[in-house]
Image (spheres, rainbow, N blue to C red):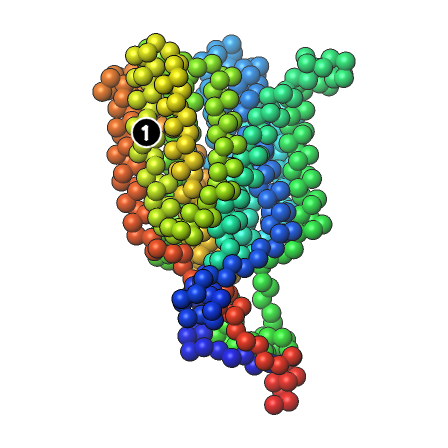
Amino acid sequence: MSRLRTEDDNPTEDTPLLQADVRVDGGDGKGPVAITPLPKAQISILFVLMLVEPILSQSIYPFINQLVSELDIIHGDEKKVGYYAGLIESIFYLTEVVFVIQWSRLSDYIGRKPVLLIGMAGATTSMICFGLSKKFWQLVLSRCILGALNGNVGAMQSVVGELTDSTNMAQVFALMPVAWSVGATTAPLIGGQLAKPHDRWPNVFGNKFWIRYPYFLPCAVAAACAALACLIAALFMKETLKRKKSLHSSASSCEDPEEQASETTVPLLTLLKHPRVLLSVANYGALCLLDIAYRAVQPLFFATPRSLGGLGLPPSTIGLILGSFGIFNGILQALWFAPLVRRFGPKHVHMAGLGAFIPLWILFPVIGGLAHWQGGMTPLVWSMVMLQQVVSVVMDTAYGCVFMYITSSAPNRSSLGGTNGIGQLVAAFVRAVGPASATSLFAVSLERNWLGGGAVWLILILVSCALWTVSLHLPKETWPRESDHHSNETVVGSDCDSQTDS
């Protein structure tokens, strides 16, 4: 079988992963972009896996403080609850730092599907163990299992890169926040409503088991979600990693040697030095650091008394604000993200999202000052809170863009898992250390009265300005992918025998 190849069709080991847009007019660069249809069934399965991720990580948040307070480790000192609860929450990310890149790299060799199945099976086991834990070390070990076996996010991003091309990738990344938001909204409902079922439904859960293990039910439901997702993926998900063929097989004899070279897996140390990978991961790390700082400081600001510059809101109101953002963000991202990327390009959308942190930080002292001046939560103060939520949605568009850059920065398809693994390694690290750093800065500013307690906002604004400059070096469009180009080559002949006969 022979193929008609263009002069520049010369893939190498460093062939970029995304190709320039395909034009319906035959490729002269003047016609409209032809958007490739998405494989809806496989994308739907992927979204099911994405939906389960926040359920696994966030369903413990509503009851973790109460659970820790009931352990013998704090010895009645309620001030220690936050310390131990924070450690349990962070240990997942700390463990993920150690193992995530190995899982992502392994997916380049054994496939994406096995890694995802192992991750979901490990999550099921972890949640069951967590619900049955009665000691602090057991809780920590359960979260370590979840972090150690969780290579899902990097593998899922690799699947997106292999199911899409440069014309339809933005559509998938526009829908990803929807799946995540559904999971993030469901998680606190599971953890909050199902904890201690013997107190709420004694007729149904009157057995001694539920009294001894009052937090098993929400953990079991989260585990069931993971088990169901694992079953769906096992039965219906198709492997997206292109298997390397033997050089002695008849099929491989039809392939160009240079094309075979393009499938060579790039060593990890080489990936770490690759300019495209470094640039995209640096932008991802900057975004994750600022975002996790914002997510940690926001509820703390809401709960801080008005006399100290906060809003003094109760937990129920704070939960309503945070939960409404998840729904609001998911809907708007699904409607606006892909059109925005097509209209302005991923670089400009990403820069706008990363730059949105500056007004986000500015709004904190503005909202706090208005609440103190007007003596409470007036309509004007609430409107400022809603404005901050809208700006947060603008910020969140940066995630879809940076995922596109990371996916397209892989030197070739066989290095896609390793590239995404590096990104998740950086993300897990900053998410492990970012919350404590941001909340400590908030506390120190109040305690030492730096700039009237507002030094935290000035410092975060300066950090945001510095990190925003990283986005200036991104190309206007994502890097081209070799597979998109090959998909448009004209195939002549039906099999290898035709080449042999000729």
Which residue corresponds to the image point at 57% horizontal and 20% vertical from the top-left? 63
Give the image location of residue 122, x and y in percent: 63, 40
Q: Residue 271, can we see it? A: no
Please determine whether, in this image, residue 417 is positioned above or below residue 491: above
Q: Residue 164, can we see it? A: yes
Relative side of 52 to 201, left or right: left
Which residue corresponds to the image point at 42% horizontal and 42% vertical from the top-left? 397
Figure quadrant of the C terminus: bottom right
Give the image location of residue 236, x and y in percent: 69, 51
Please determine whether, in this image, residue 238 is positioned above or below residue 435: below
Figure quadrant of the N terminus: bottom right
Relative side of 215 to 65, left or right: right
Outermost residue on the left side: it is 451
Please determine whether, in this image, residue 206 is positioned above or below residue 30: above
Please determine whether, in this image, residue 150 is positioned above or below residue 250: above
Give the image location of residue 282, x and y in percent: 36, 47
For the residue pair 398 and 193, the one nearer the viewer reads as 398
Label 1: which secondary element: helix
Amino acid type, callout 1: Trp
Which residue corresponds to the image point at 44% horizontal and 56% vertical from the top-left? 408
Outermost residue on the bottom side: it is 502
Give the image location of residue 110, x and y in percent: 60, 56
The image shows a total of numbered marks equal to 1
For the residue pair 76 and 447, the one nearer the viewer reads as 447
Which residue corresponds to the image point at 50% horizontal and 53% vertical from the top-left? 169
Q: Residues within 10 Å of mark 1 (few under 14, many from 20)?
A: many
Q: Quadrant of residue 141?
A: top right
Q: Which residue is identified by label 1?
A: 361
